[in-house]
């Protein structure tokens, strides 16, 4: 579909607008919460512990969030997450106006991370209920572009607000952004979620079983779909290293190149610009080149950028390479998410998304800790060279998998048909019934 027909989609336009404002508020928290902790405790270790609590809560939510996104009304679920985060973050400035309580931040961050992960999973599934299949890549590109812009402008605005009015004011703005999203979603209409075939979830008992086994069902679908299986495995490797890359960039600029905080901010803003450009260009690049060349090219670009960054000794080189790295990661990310939305049946998309994120992100915190520790001990050149080699190895390995195909969404086959893992046993026909042949179609295996 053309960009013009996507613009004519009123529901997507409203969704896009309110989520852009909400992401600006989310970006405020990147600056506001660390400043609030430091103002209250003076301890950087407290912020690290707070981040760990939030990460653990997100990981646990990923195990069950997909089943909720598939079984409950997605628009209402999004609104519930926004309402919960409005209340949670709104409690912080109210409490701080009375008496600062650091324990409240741990409660707020843990609970908010639950709703944040649930919102992200449902957000991905909602896109396919807003636009046509042909518009998915373009829609994701627009959403990713505005998210990147939000994470350029948000921290800068948060710093100004915190400087004039204190960190709690920035937290209050973050809370208000969820209120804007909540109101906006009330005016968005999603197409009904596609129903599974009769027998997969035809009874209340089957529905309850499905909610309990949502992660297993999503992981099973990933395993049965060759291109998604390969992406999950290879992204587990890249995410292990990429989560800590922003910290490495900052360390390289501050300690390796001796730059001040203002320069660090400018370079990271340029990284956000790279993400914006990639998000805007992904739909056109994928139409011209296809999925495989885009994804493989993105990984090679990331590898070369990281290698040059490690050996370079100029700020200009660092700025360009970090921008190119961000471009490559965004291009690969939008392509990957769009492909997953295209090949996954609508009623399984939440479970598949949560399983995908949980699996390939499960080792990321450990990887970030290891990478930053090595950089602190050895400097950036050696560790970044290793990262570059790993990214290149991932690209080479992907060239021998279905990832290399230009249009894997047209050939994705999940193996021989089997009864869905979460379906109730087939009914046994009454003894008096005449014998007949039955055909069982695995909706997760052959229905796309």
Image (cartoon, rainbow, N blue to C red):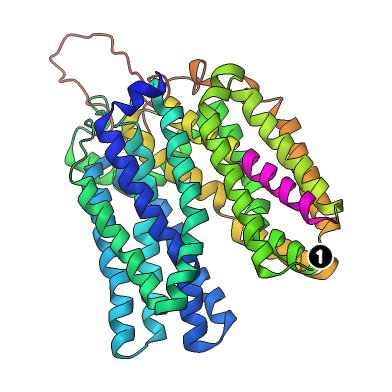
Q: Quadrant of residue 404?
A: top right
In the rendered image, the quadrant that contains the N terminus is top left
Element class at badge 1: helix
Q: Residue at x 46, y 79 (%)?
A: 36
Q: Which residues are magenta?
A: 313-329
Q: Residue at x 36, y 30 (%)?
A: 420
Q: Which residue is mark 1?
A: 256
Measuring from the top left, give residue 175's x and y in whole percent: 31, 65
Measuring from the top left, give residue 252's x and y in whole percent: 76, 62
In the picture provided, is 89 more to the left or to the right than 156? left
Q: Characterize the local packing of mark 1: few (<14), some (14-19) or many (20 or more) Cα atoms within 10 angstroms.
A: some
Q: Residue at x 85, y 66 (%)?
A: 378
In the rendered image, the quadrant that contains the C terminus is top left
In the picture provided, is 274 more to the left or to the right than 343? right
Q: Is residue 197 visible?
A: yes
Secondary structure character of the magenta stretch overall: helix
Magenta includes 315? yes
């Amino acid at each position: 579909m053309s960009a013009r027909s996507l613009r004519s989609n009123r529901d997507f336009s409203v969704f896009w607008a309110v989520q852009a404002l909400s992401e600006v508020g989310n970006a405020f928290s990147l600056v506001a919460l660390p400043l609030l902790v430091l103002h209250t405790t003076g301890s950087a270790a407290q912020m690290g512990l707070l981040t760990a609590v939030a990460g653990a809560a997100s990981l646990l939510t990923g195990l069950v969030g997909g089943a909720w996104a598939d079984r409950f009304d997605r628009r209402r679920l999004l609104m519930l997450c926004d309402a919960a985060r409005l209340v949670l973050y709104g409690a912080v400035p109210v409490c701080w106006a009375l008496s600062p309580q650091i324990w409240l931040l741990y409660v707020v961050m843990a609970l908010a991370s639950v709703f944040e992960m649930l919102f992200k999973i449902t957000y991905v599934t909602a896109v396919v209920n807003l636009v046509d299949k042909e518009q998915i890549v373009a829609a994701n590109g627009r959403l990713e572009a505005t998210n990147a812009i939000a994470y350029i402008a948000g921290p800068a605005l948060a710093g100004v607000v915190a400087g004039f009015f204190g960190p709690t004011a920035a937290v209050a703005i973050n809370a208000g952004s969820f209120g804007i999203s909540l109101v906006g979603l009330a005016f968005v209409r999603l197409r009904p979620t596609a129903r599974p075939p009769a027998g997969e979830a035809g009874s209340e008992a089957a529905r309850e079983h499905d909610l309990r086994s949502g992660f297993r069902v999503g992981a099973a679908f990933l395993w049965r779909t060759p291109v998604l299986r390969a992406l999950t495995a290879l992204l587990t490797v890249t995410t292990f290293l990429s989560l800590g890359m922003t910290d490495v960039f900052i360390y390289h600029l501050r300690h390796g190149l001796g730059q001040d905080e203002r320069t660090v901010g400018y370079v990271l803003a340029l990284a956000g610009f790279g993400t914006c450009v990639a998000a805007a260009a992904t739909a056109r690049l994928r139409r011209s080149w296809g999925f495989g060349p885009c994804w493989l090219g993105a990984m090679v670009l990331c590898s070369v950028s990281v290698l040059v960054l490690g050996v370079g000794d100029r700020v200009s080189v660092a700025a360009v390479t970090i921008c190119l790295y961000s471009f490559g990661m965004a291009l690969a990310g939008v392509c990957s998410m769009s492909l997953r939305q295209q090949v996954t049946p609508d009623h399984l998309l939440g479970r598949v998304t949560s399983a995908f994120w949980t699996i390939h992100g499960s080792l990321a915190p450990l990887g970030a800790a290891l990478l930053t520790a090595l950089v602190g001990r050895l400097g950036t050149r050696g560790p970044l060279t290793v990262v570059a080699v790993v990214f290149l190895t991932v690209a080479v390995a992907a060239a021998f998998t279905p990832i290399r195909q230009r249009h894997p969404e047209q050939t994705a086959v999940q193996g021989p048909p089997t009864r869905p893992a979460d379906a109730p046993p087939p009914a046994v026909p009454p003894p008096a019934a005449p014998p007949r042949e039955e055909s069982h179609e695995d909706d997760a295996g052959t229905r796309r």
